[in-house]
Amino acid sequence: MTTVLREAPPRLTSAVAAWTGVLSLAAALGAGHLVAAFVGRGASPYLAVGNAAIDLTPSWLKDFAVSSFGTHDKTVLLAGMAVVMVALAVVAGLISRERALPGQVVIAVFGVLGGVAVYGRPDLGQLALAAPLASLVAGVLVFRWLHGAALSRGVSDSRRRFLATAVAAGVAGGVGQWLGSRKNADASRAAVGPLTPARPAPPVPADADFAKLGTPTFITPNADFYRIDTALVLPQVPAEDWTLRIHGMVDRELTFTYADIRNRPLVERIITLCCVSNPVGGPYISTSRFLGVDLAELLREAGVREGAEQLFSTSADGFTAGTPVSTLLEPGRGAMLAIGMNGEPLPVEHGFPARLVVPGLYGYVSATKWVTDLELTTWDAKQAYWLQRGWAEQGPIKTESRIDAPNGHVAAGKVSVAGIAWAQHTGIDRVEVRLDGGPWQQAVLSAEVSTDTWRMWWAEVDAPAGSHSVAVRATDRDGYTQTDQVADVVPDGATGWHTITFSAR
Ligand SMILES: Nc1nc2c(c(=O)[nH]1)N[C@H]1C(S)=C(S)[C@@H](COP(=O)(O)O)O[C@H]1N2
Ligand SMILES: [Mo]
């Protein structure tokens, strides 16, 4: 009888196996990020997967993300992805304590997913696939290399490789970040120089806001203007490279360069923009002086054909919006192709070099940033980004109001209540507040700048010591008074009375 004595195969300790996975992931991401600096920043697998996640996110989850994290939703997404990736990398390591293959397969699957995400980006060409490919190759090879050293070489040799990988991944990622950020549109924006309106907006009167009582300032500084978009990496479109094509159901196709637009007589309009995702009492509303050209004029130059129902606008990053042509061509609607905001070229995050703004319509159906293409078409022919995700085809802004003050504790007695109300393109007729469900009491309105902007209001209520609630409702110039029926933001904007509580002592 012979006994075969089998030696246990060599195995990595759990810690070493986990580190093998994590460092290979770092190498993969670093390599992809570096290559992406040359072939398109959004091709960095980490960001491309994030962008794909944004586009694939079901509406309810997106609403939850926006309502829980607001404008930080993207930071939360990236952080969440990092946690998931590290966890999977640890697993890839742990299942490879004897052989490198299982971990290599996990990393390769990662790489392929990154490739699929990049392939799906409307703003990236085939060359961009080089970034996820670099990640895949780097990840698989580094995994094998670290695994081999840890299994059969000495501890110090193996440590040296782990350290070298960490440093190389960090350097590649850092250099990629640096190279990529040099390719931004800041220089182009800085070179635009002054944009002068042929028709400036009238100055804003001093009594257009009650900022001293806690309302926002009438004009929102650019840095405070709310920002909502699907872009994980801001589109960087130099003005020199930008063109806008108008085509589809038109008599003649037109293409404009930035110079074509800026050399036209520019008009300035003060408009309050609002997001359909703004919950009752929410922050996604701001006002700016937009500078640009009249959109209806451009469309008339192209000659809108009979039967065109929808202006389908596309941005440099593939976002799309559909706007009713009838609204755009309405006399006095004032829709704009904007290139300036509060006396500056559009900030990059608000659409540099050019965007659309349509008074009275929510941003998702009208306010395409980084806009490059306008197609006249029908509703049946094309569905815009949010329409595909269950939001309404038509997005007129609903008449609403918000309480900004008081905020917290106040002294008992006469308490000043103040806030904003809006009914873009219709105008606010009156605002009423009521304390603790009592009688409605009319608020004082600020000077009206135009019907396309918000209106501030202020009222005084008698509040004895104790805790109280205040509700607000606005009535617009069409005679519509805000309903108390609470509606969610999906599919076409929230309704309900904003109510706050405060305590007086
Ligand atoms: N390219 C692009 N444009 C876009 C969006 C977007 O996701 N991508 N979001 C729209 C939405 S939903 C709104 S409310 C406005 C917000 O514009 P702001 O970020 O300048 O406030 O932009 C619109 N234009
Ligand atoms: Mo929006």
Image: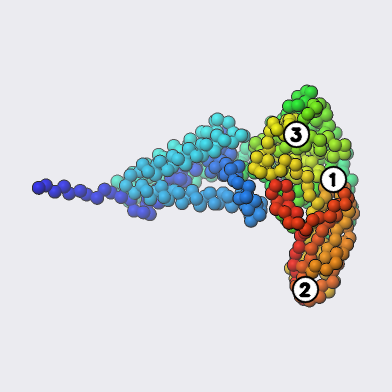
| Upstream in sequence: badge 1 or badge 2 | 1
| Upstream in sequence: badge 3 or badge 2 | 3
Of tags 1 and 2, the one toward the viewer is 1
Is 312 positioned to the left or the right of 270 in the image? Answer: left
Within the image, what quadrant is residue 408 found in? bottom right
User: Percent from the top left, x then y, of residue 50?
Assistant: 57, 44
Q: Nearer the viewer, residue 498 or 155?
A: 498
Is 54 positioned to the left or the right of 423 in the image? Answer: left
- Identify the secondary structure beneath mark 3: strand
User: Percent from the top left, x then y, of residue 458?
Assistant: 85, 62
| Residue at the disc numbered 1 | 425
Is 301 positioned to the left or the right of 73 in the image? Answer: right
| Upstream in sequence: badge 3 or badge 1 | 3
User: Percent from the top left, x then y, of residue 474?
Assistant: 83, 56
Structural crowding at the residue carrying mark 1, measured as other residues with C-alpha within 10 Å and reported as few (<14), some (14–19) or many (≥20)? many
| Residue at the disc numbered 2 | 504
Q: How many marks?
A: 3
The amino acid type, in three-letter code, at marker 2 is Ala
Alpha carbon separation for disc pair 3 and 1 = 20 Å
Residue at 43% of width from left, 42% of height from top? Answer: 107
The amino acid type, in three-letter code, at marker 1 is His
Q: Which mark is residue 310?
A: 3
Residue at 76% of width from left, 24% of height from top? Answer: 253
Badges 1 and 2: C-beta atoms under 8 Å apart?
A: no
- Identify the secondary structure beneath mark 1: loop
Residue at 85% of width from left, 52% of height from top? Answer: 480
Q: Nearer the viewer, residue 299 or 186?
A: 299
The amino acid type, in three-letter code, at marker 3 is Gln
Of tags 3 and 2, the one toward the viewer is 3
User: Percent from the top left, x then y, of residue 503?
Assistant: 75, 72
Q: Is mark 1 within 8 Å of ligand 1?
A: no
